[in-house]
Image (spheres, helix red, strand yellow):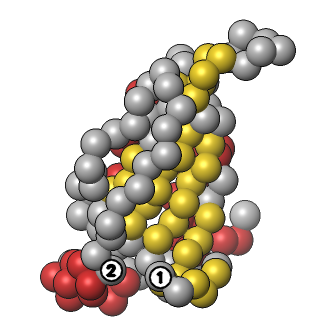
Amino acid sequence: MFDTAVGKVGVYICYDRHFPEGWRALGLNGAEIVFNPSATHRGLSEYLWRIEQPAAAVANIYYVGAINRVGIEPLGENDFYGQSYFVDPEGKFVGDVGDPYQPELIIRDLDLDKIRQVRDRWAFYRDRRPDAYDELVEH
């Protein structure tokens, strides 16, 4: 977790995005924006790309910056599908999704006040029941 001039920033790298526990740990540590840099190629999990990060943003009530490599690996056959984006704490896309074939820089204005508004409406942290899933951390 990094305290920055724009808020508390967390980083959750590539393959880790498939595991909800890490997203939650970042939220419990105060994340306001979580960046998920990835190098994921077409095929294997492309269909999950626009599902997992918005779901994590909603469940943990923070912004997610989903960043994926784009282009073809010159020393292999991997074709990375790009499509980077930001989602807000309601899981809504902030601006357009990035290009699937061309590199680009995506810049978005994020309203951090929205985090508090959504947390007041959806009290997921208040209502969670860690005692009901102790076994998750025992294994």
Toward the viewer: 102 or 134?
102
**Residue receiving disc 1:** 6
Q: Quadrant of the C terminus?
A: bottom right
Q: Quadrant of residue 90?
A: bottom left
Give the farthest residue toward the right: 75
Residue drawn at (41%, 56%), measured in percent from left and top?
107
**Residue receiving disc 2:** 112
Among numbered discs 2 and 1, the one appearing first in the sequence? 1
Residue 49, x across and y down, in percent: 44, 37
Per the image, label 1 sits on a secondary structure element best described as loop
Q: Quadrant of residue 70?
A: top right
Q: Quadrant of the N terminus?
A: bottom right
Q: Amino acid at mark 1?
A: Val
Residue drawn at (46%, 56%), measured in percent from left and top?
65
Is residue 110 among the parts visible in the rendering? yes
Residue drawn at (49%, 46%), measured in percent from left and top?
105
- Left or right side of 72 for 18: left
Per the image, label 2 sits on a secondary structure element best described as loop
Q: Is residue 105 above or below residue 110?
A: above
Residue 28, x across and y down, in percent: 51, 82
Q: Is residue 83 above or below residue 130?
A: above
- Left or right side of 113 for 76: right
Q: Amino acid at mark 2?
A: Leu
Residue 21, x across and y down, in percent: 56, 64
Is residue 55 among the parts visible in the rendering? no
Q: Is residue 47 above or below residue 96?
A: above
For the residues labelled 2 and 1, say whether their Cβ atoms are less than 8 Å apart: yes
Toward the viewer: 9 or 50?
9
Q: Residues within 10 Å of mark 1 (few under 14, many from 20)?
A: few
Residue 13, x across and y down, in percent: 66, 53
Q: CA distance from mark 2 to mark 1?
A: 9 Å
Which one is in front in this view, the residue at disc 2 or the one at disc 1? 1
